[in-house]
Image: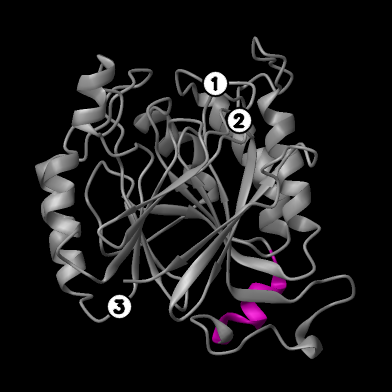
Amino acid sequence: MPITLPPISRRRILTGALAGGLAAFCPKWLLAAGEKPIDPHRIALLSDVHVNEDKAFKYKTGVIPYETMGQAIKEILALEKQPANVIVNGDCAAHNGNPGDYTAFVDGVEPLRKAGMPVHLVLGNHDRRENFFKGVWESTTRQKDETIVDRQVSIIDAGRASIIMLDSLDQTNKTPGVLGEKQLAWLTKALDARADKTLMLFIHHDPDDEAARAASKKALSGLTDTKALMDIILPRKQVKAYVFGHTHYWKHIDMQGMHLVNLPPTAWVFAKERPQGWVDLSLREDGATFELHALDVKHPQHGEKFECKWR
């Protein structure tokens, strides 16, 4: 049941014909006073926002997730050229995916929607699927095709790439994730139907590195059906990137020419030396740039860029 939070803005109606990369930017004559031009090849990425129904909720490290998400949103709104889309790559809710978490989350992202940006949502292990669907239903639009019942999957056209968002939520507040045979079968068909497209996958959970996990003797915390997923996407060269969150870590790995990009958390970090923030994704014909916007501009990785050339 793919749903998205649509924009609340007149300019999206006026500029709808410009979607899909037909124009570099929204013509100035379509903009009302104070509105900013839209870059159709720019996407703002957040992950692990962990919004609590209590907007003043403070995590044990002192982080208030509603405020850190709010700071990221203010920074996005301050950009001279606005992203055409915003993606929140999982863990929209705090810990247990309570109904009120989603009410607070929808309130928090409203400024993006008022500025004309649709907000696309991925589910993570701290979300609760039934509360998510109920909590955001009144504010959403639903796609009529590309649907798997009871899963939050979406395909969006971002001009120079198509974004496929998958649902890896297994059990709420349990760390590992799973896509499952049905979703993998759907993905295979979706990829094969787009053999001539540039495709990027957004999944909350990280791919499991079985060898590294065995060496460290850690329990599996990522995607339990990683091998089945990789068997599908690695041979299909139209899949250029797999973007994930979950680990609260900012990093990039090249896997046989396919880019694995780990988004930082917008809420708390697991180690104090790691950055929290959001990522500015710029799409090119031959690749993409992922730029970190750390919430602490003094962080040594603030402004760090991953330059990814497509295989």
Q: Which residues are magenta?
A: 9-17
Please tell me which residue is depicted at 88% across the width and 70% down the height of the picture: 34
Q: Amino acid at mark 2?
A: Arg
Q: Quadrant of residue 41?
A: bottom right
Q: Is residue 290 magenta?
A: no
Image position of 282 with respect to 64: above or below: below
Q: Where is mark 3, residue-wise?
A: 197
Q: Main secondary structure of the magenta part?
A: helix
- Mark 1–mark 3 Cα distance, whole angstroms, equals 36 Å
Q: Cβ–Cβ below 8 Å for labels 1 and 2?
A: yes
Position in image of residue 90 (x %, y %): 45, 38
The disc label shown at residue 274, or none: 2
Q: Cβ–Cβ below 8 Å for labels 3 and 2?
A: no
Image position of 176 with respect to 109: above or below: above
Q: Is residue 164 left or right of residue 217?
A: right
Q: Where is mark 1, residue-wise?
A: 270
Please tell me which residue is depicted at 34% across the width and 36% down the height of the picture: 205
Front residue (pair 275, 217): 217
Q: Quadrant of residue 244?
A: top left
Please state which of the two labelled residues, at mark 1 or mark 3, is closer to the viewer.
1
Element carrying mark 2: loop
Q: Quadrant of residue 226?
A: top left
